Amino acid sequence: MSQPVIITVALVGAELTLAECPHLPITPEQIGQAAAEACQAGASIIHLHVRMLDGRPTQDKEIFRQAIAAIQARCDVIIQVSTGGAVGMTAQERLQPVHLKPEMASLTTGSVNFGNEIFANPWSLIQDFAQAMQEHGVKPELEIFDAGMIANALRLRDKGLVSEPLHFDLVLGVPGGMPATVRNLVYLVESLPPGASWSAAGIGRAQTLLAAAAIAMGGHARVGFEDNIYYRRGELATSNAQLAARVSRLATELGRPVASPADARRILGLRGGQA
Ligand code: KMH
Ligand code: ZN
């Protein structure tokens, strides 16, 4: 039997505005509702950013606590908090939600241009974040925007700051990072260490293409408003669940079952439970 596909849904992001995406969840309750719908549509991981009530991005621990509670009141799903936050936030700000001991957190292992801005992740910050995750029992998802970031992730492993099995998210299509092509995806996957699991996240219109390629290649897929707000060219998606449902259908058509949260925990080597 083929390995189940873990569908991650990145519900909120940090850069997107309500003006651009009218269905963007903002409040903890809206985030809880959007997560529940995404789970119904096949999500087993929620990649989580939160917002202030006026929509501005924040890494405030209390708002994360409320959003996580609102999600867990509605569904069993793996919560993966963002430590990327928004461009320009300090390291201390970004690290706050890790102190809530969620099952997972994102960990970008290098710096990358985001259009005209820089998503800055110096080596000292990367090590500090990995160490904090280790101390809090939080599994990192290693976010890879460019090939050199895999080498940094392996340096973390060699220093004992991340433990195997490693899990990577290959994010392609950020303006300034690696372009979203199947060739680049194949190159990155071939550069991963043996035994690692991985998902692909295509930015913008590449979202569906990379999800399909990842499913066909035996990987996992990430979708959601953080990465793409369109269902198809010129047509805004009406919910995160709509994007997740398409990936579920793709997986089924390609002969792979959609992972339950229990399947995802087994594949990722998580012990399971609540944040
Ligand atoms: N908002 C981006 C600057 C993550 O969540 O770890 C970084 C980001 C990555 O979203
Ligand atoms: Zn994110």
Image (cartoon, grey):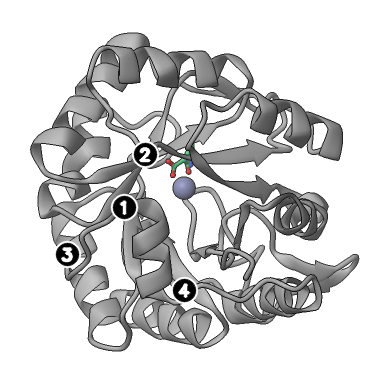
Which dot marks residue 38?
none
- Taking the spot 33% from the left edge, 66% from the top edge, the residue there is 78
* Mark positioned earlier in the residue sequence (1 or 4): 4
Q: Is mark 4 within 8 Å of ligand 2?
A: no
Task: Identify the amino acid type marked 1.
Answer: Gly
- Taking the spot 50% from the left edge, 14% from the top edge, the residue there is 151
Q: Residues within 10 Å of mark 4 (few under 14, many from 20)?
A: many
Would you name the residue on which mark 4 appears?
A: 25
Task: Identify the amino acid type marked 4.
Answer: Pro
User: In the visual, does 224 lie left or right of 182?
Assistant: left
Would you name the residue on which mark 1 appears?
A: 269
Task: Identify the amino acid type marked 3.
Answer: Ala
Marks 1 & 2, CB-CB < 8 Å contact = yes
| Mark-to-mark CA distance, 3 and 1 | 16 Å
Would you name the residue on which mark 2 appears?
A: 165
Marks 1 & 4, CB-CB < 8 Å contact = no
Would you name the residue on which mark 3 appears?
A: 275
Residue 55 seen anywhere in this rendered image of the structure: no
Marks 3 & 4, CB-CB < 8 Å contact = no
Marks 3 & 2, CB-CB < 8 Å contact = no
* Mark positioned earlier in the residue sequence (3 or 2): 2
* Mark positioned earlier in the residue sequence (1 or 2): 2
User: In the visual, does 39 lie left or right of 66?
Assistant: right
